Amino acid sequence: MEDKSYLDKKYFIDSFVYNCPFCNRSNIRYEMFDYFVFNWTNDKLCHGYLVQCTSCEKISMHLSYDEISDFRNYSSGRQIRIFREGIDIDSKIFYSVPTSFFVIDRRVPNFLRELVTEAEDCLRMNYLTGASACLRKAIYEFLVYEKAKGKDYEKRIKFLKSRYSELDPQLFDILAHIQDMKSDKVREQSWDKWDSNYLNLIIETLKTVFYEIYILPKQKKERSITIQRLNEVVQKEKNRKWKIPSI
């Protein structure tokens, strides 16, 4: 069977189904609530799309420099506006509110989640300097939060690599060799911006590390608790059925 788990990381899956950032439901139907257009600059238009989740009924906003919507006519005479079919909607949108918070689970510490999400937003708008600064700060805050020991940046990453030895070591190797991160002093004015490919690599690496450290263990614990409770119910029911009535 084809692996389509990558769809869980998208905002819009197609013209009718998306992953809702409000109720956190995947593959839920949405409707385009409204459409507007405004002048982004003197010679550039921006198109705004408001979409509503059919489950929680909350509305999100999405901006694009392209007109990517179309009308669909129904036999009943009803006409609705939808995102054009057959396109990668996410690739056409440069800004959304709420942001893709559903991609980074709420179990990740809030300050780390915010920094990585802000870096993603900057990258979408091609603000490479801002994205680079947010990721550098996210990594430093991550090391502080984890109480990583070591005299320099590389040794602190190796400390975490040893602590979380069950994780893919390549993840920490990528973080250990990040450009401009080996200085202990945070002097953002002296740092160069990273290019978009490098930024994507660091973002995805951090997301994977966060998932393995903060989310997966809790999911395993939650599943174990669920199984334990179900087992208790089954055992109680079994004992009830086989209980010998007193004479």
Image (cartoon, helix red, strand yellow):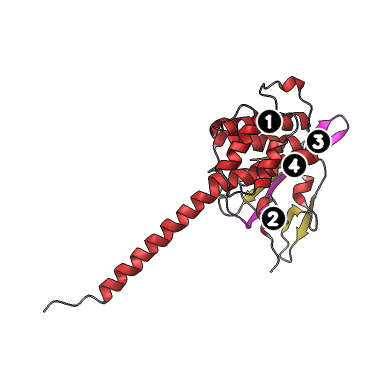
Q: Which residues are magenta?
A: 25-47
Task: Name the amino acid type tagged 4.
Answer: Asn
Q: CA distance from mark 4 to mark 2?
A: 15 Å
Mark with earlier residue (4, 1)? 1
- In the depicted view, which residue is nearer to us: 93 or 167? 167
Q: Which residue is mark 2?
A: 6
Q: CA distance from mark 1 to mark 3?
A: 14 Å
Name which residue lies at 73% across and 31% down: 132
Q: CA distance from mark 4 to mark 3?
A: 9 Å
Name which residue lies at 64% across and 49% down: 168
Say which of marks 4 and 2 sits in front: 4
Q: Are marks 4 and 3 in contact (CB under 8 Å)?
A: no
Name which residue lies at 34% across and 65% down: 233
* Residue 238, percent from left and from top: 30, 73
Q: Which mark is residue 200?
A: 4
Is any part of residue 58 visible from this angle? no
